[in-house]
Amino acid sequence: MAHISQISSFLSTVLIFLALCITLFTNPTLALPALKLNPLQDFCVADLQATPTNSGFPCKSQVTSEDFFYSGLNTPLNTSNPKGIAANPANLLTFPGLNTLGISMYNVAIAPGGYNQPHSHPGATEAGVVIEGWVLVGFLTTNNTLYSKVIGPGDMFVIPPGLIHYEGNVGKTQCRLLTVVADDLPSEIGVPHTLFATKPAIPNAVLMAAFKADSNTIDMLRSKFTT
């Protein structure tokens, strides 16, 4: 009975999380930066076969029930890669029904010792719930304050819009998260790659001044991201 009670409590947490995300990311009165609702139409399922413009993809002319359902999050995840992280995205490009709705969802798995590098989603809030394992989640504010905590199954987190953040598996088994970002196709800026893998490269003198390091150190760091 205790096991059943724990499962019921966990499912309740996930349902509350999803309800919060729907309220947070689809309520136009909240005026989220990434929200692109058009009050003149109920929806605009993206026609991915058409050529996108600066305004995005045009709407499909023929819409069916299938356009509003997606099962791709259930695809098995393989974390056997150098980063130790894998994700199944439900965004505009995989789930065209999300077009203009200002929301996307991700099933994320991280191997023990794996980390999602410090990154940001410009203009977009992120929220998540841990499904399995133990995860270190942290974000940095614009005044260089770090907020972080290790969280476990059923625990939720939120990252304010555009702030640099990270997630890492601090447990002994694979961890899994369900995350939501307030954009149907959020951009991601990875801090290390942005600094050391640009084309053309940022001049060494700029990075030497920023990191108070010599040129050899900068070359060594750059080589980690360009090979």
Image: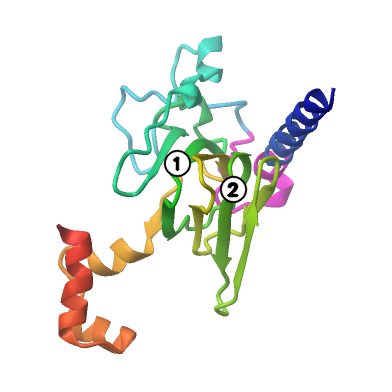
Q: Report the mark closest to the observer, 1 or 2.
A: 2
| Rendered image: mark on residue 134 | 2
Residue 226 located left or right of residue 135:
left
Residue 129 point in image, percent of width and height: 64, 42
At label 1, the amino acid type is Leu
Residue 2 located left or right of residue 177:
right
Nearest to the observer: residue 222 or residue 143? 222
Residue at x-position 59% and y-position 36%: 38
Q: Which residues are magenta?
A: 23-39
Residue 135 point in image, percent of width and height: 57, 51
| Rendered image: mark on residue 185 | 1
Nearest to the observer: residue 223 or residue 15? 223
Magenta-drawn stretch contains 27: yes
Position above or below: 2 against 124: above
> How far apart, in angstroms, are the residues tagged by discs 1 and 2?
27 Å
Position above or below: 146 against 157: below
